[in-house]
Amino acid sequence: LRIVNSDKFRHEKAFKLAYGSQDILENVEVFSKIEESLADMDFVVGTSSKKRRLKYDYYPCSELTKFLLNKNESIKNIAIVFGREDKGLKNTEIQLCDIISSIPMKNSYPSLNLAQSVMIFAYCLSSFSFKQLNAKNMPATADEVQLSVLKKNIALLLQKVGFSLKSSIYKRILERLGALSDIDAHLLYSSYNKT
């Protein structure tokens, strides 16, 4: 569990509410900036109940396990990012995410209670394990594709051919990289390395 700019988890009330799982609170990592908290992540899933123009594709939380398993060995470290209780994630934070996931609702609500949202995502991901994702269960070799490396290389390539960092097509291409399967990531990575 990583927390950005808050110490509320240290309060006595938090430990009372975390009955039986105080060890999680005792091992929280605290960061001053979200960018720092995500620096070692290969794949970042943002959560939002609101559709925003920053991202086009929203994936239901019930499909996340299947989606992540489709990545196979192209990702090693995954973050699920939740925003503030009252306002959710800021637009700048949404832009740091590879994909956005939401909880499908019958009726439109501005947001859900944060604790309930975390529990729903935890339930949806309860069958997921890195052993499934990385069948070899070994560290990545130099030949194995990591989506984060591919994303950095494609971003550099887009800049070299003249795409502005602020252009919507630049952002859309990087967003779609997050949806690539492991097979497609390998294909794109091998094609890129030959050019």
Image (cartoon, rainbow, N blue to C red):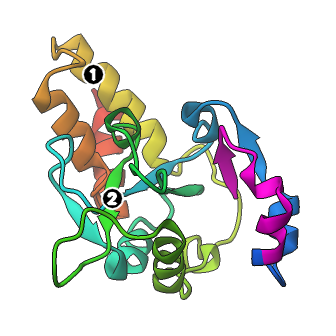
Res. 57 image quadrant:
bottom left
Vertical placement of residue 7 versus 179, above or below: above
Point out residue 76 in the picture as x, y percentages from the top left corner.
58, 57
Q: Residue at x 45, y 83 (%)?
A: 124
Residue 48, label in figure: 2
Left or right of residue 163: residue 22: right
Magenta range: 1-16
Left or right of residue 23: residue 98: left
Tell me if mark 1 has few (under 14), some (14-19) or many (20+) residues whose alpha carbon lies within 10 angstroms of its own. Answer: few
Q: Nearer the viewer, residue 25 or 137?
A: 25
**Which residue position holds label 1?**
157
Q: Residue at x 51, y 86 (%)?
A: 123
Q: Residue at x 63, y 40 (%)?
A: 37
Callout 1 amino acid: Leu
Point out residue 73 in the picture as x, y percentages from the top left corner.
51, 62
Vertical placement of residue 160 versus 117, above or below: above
